[in-house]
Amino acid sequence: MVIYTGQFTLDVYDILATQKAVREFVESKGGHLQQLSGNTMVLRIPSEQFRHVEPHLRTLGRVDDRLTDIRAQDITEEYYDIELRLKSKKKYVESLYVLLDQSGKLQDKLAVQQEIARVVEEIERLEGRLRLLGNQVSLATVTVTLRLAHSGSERTFKLPWGWLDTLGVENLVP
Amino acid sequence: MKTLTMTLFVALLASGCVNLRTPDGYAEMERTGLYDYKAVSTDASVVAVRVHRNQDKKQGTLAYWTEASRKHLTLSRGYDFKEEGKFASDQGEGRWLLFQKKYRGTDYLYLLGLVVKGRDIYALEAGGEKGVFEADIAKVVKAFASLD
């Protein structure tokens, strides 16, 4: 069980258009936009689609590789450990309910109820943790920060083939 | 007779002769200026072809020139890449790339088709204001495929 996260910074000429393109791409893969703050987007995408993200971003702009951060965190051991602890605590709570039935004195009943409440709270916390891990495993988290290409980026892209400069609408249309 | 045939053959080679089936709604211009073929629609959309020299015919493949063109237009010239596709012509397999660019305050679409055959790179270009050219894309790609 692996949690995938990716952080990418792109230099682009049109931030709004690129944001739209990124969002449409992620949605086409079954994901969604989780947060948009200024020029930074946080997106969730099914983990099996995560490998398509970086190649696609490279078609939308220049990826600043110095700021790229891709991680795959294996949480298998943690997940199964929590599952085991959960199982054990649920069994313990069952035994506490049996004890509660058997308790005669009010003082004993109160003590058992307090213990049940404590353990149930732990169970809920562990279940919440499992849900969170499950969500993080099934949906990778991708953070995309966009920068305007003609300000702030140091590198000017240039290929030496002169004929490429003859391409484009500027030369084509009357 | 032989001299005449040879003269015609050499003239043909020298002219960078390009044949393309002009799309409906476009009229071909006489071959002057930069392009080996050029046609214009009544909406001022243009289809044009120019042949460039492939300096490295071994490594200068269709895939190479497609990627070089895409990167040049998006990273050096501010074009937004939209989508891509393939086509087949008599000169060989082709790839097309569709871009959008703001020009003169208006959104323009620019369609670039590339075919590589040995020492020749055929750059098939088409473009116009987005509102009118978008409807022409399919027939222009068909025209690209008629490259002869």
Image: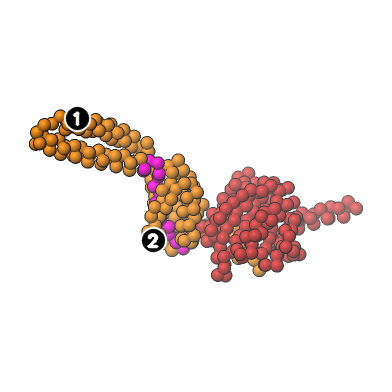
Residue A29 position in % (x across, y down): 48, 46
Residue type at numbered disc 1: Val
Residue placed under numbered mark 2 in the picture? A38
Q: Nearer the viewer, residue A57 or B35?
A: A57
| Quarter of the figure with the N terminus of chain A | top left
- Horizontally, is A122 left or right of A72 in the view? left
Residue A154 position in % (x across, y down): 43, 59
Disc nearer the start of the sequence (2/1)? 2
Chain letter for the part of the structure drawn in orange: A
Chain assignment, label 1: A
Where disc 1 sits, the SS reads: helix
Residue type at numbered disc 2: Gly
The mark closer to the camera, 2 or 1, is 1
CB within 8 Å, label 2 to label 1:
no
Residue placed under numbered mark 1 in the picture? A98
Where disc 2 sits, the SS reads: loop
How many numbered badges does the structure rendering display?
2
Magenta residues (range)? A135-150
Which image quarter: residue B108?
Answer: bottom right
Say which colour chain B has: red
In the image, residue A1 sits, relative to residue A156, either above or below, namely above
Query: Please, what is the dominant secondary structure of the magenta stretch?
Result: strand
- Horizontally, is B6 left or right of A52 in the view? right
- What residue is shown at x 39% (from left), y 57% (from top)? A36
Chain assignment, label 2: A
Any magenta on residue B84?
A: no
- Horizontally, is A139 left or right of A130 in the view? right
Residue A160 position in % (x across, y down): 56, 56
- What residue is shown at x 72% (from left), y 58% (from top)? B23
Question: Tag 1: Cα neighbours inside 10 Å, few (<14), some, or many (≥20)?
Answer: few
Do marks 2 and 1 both belong to one polypeptide chain?
yes
- What residue is shown at x 54% (from left), y 54% (from top)? B71
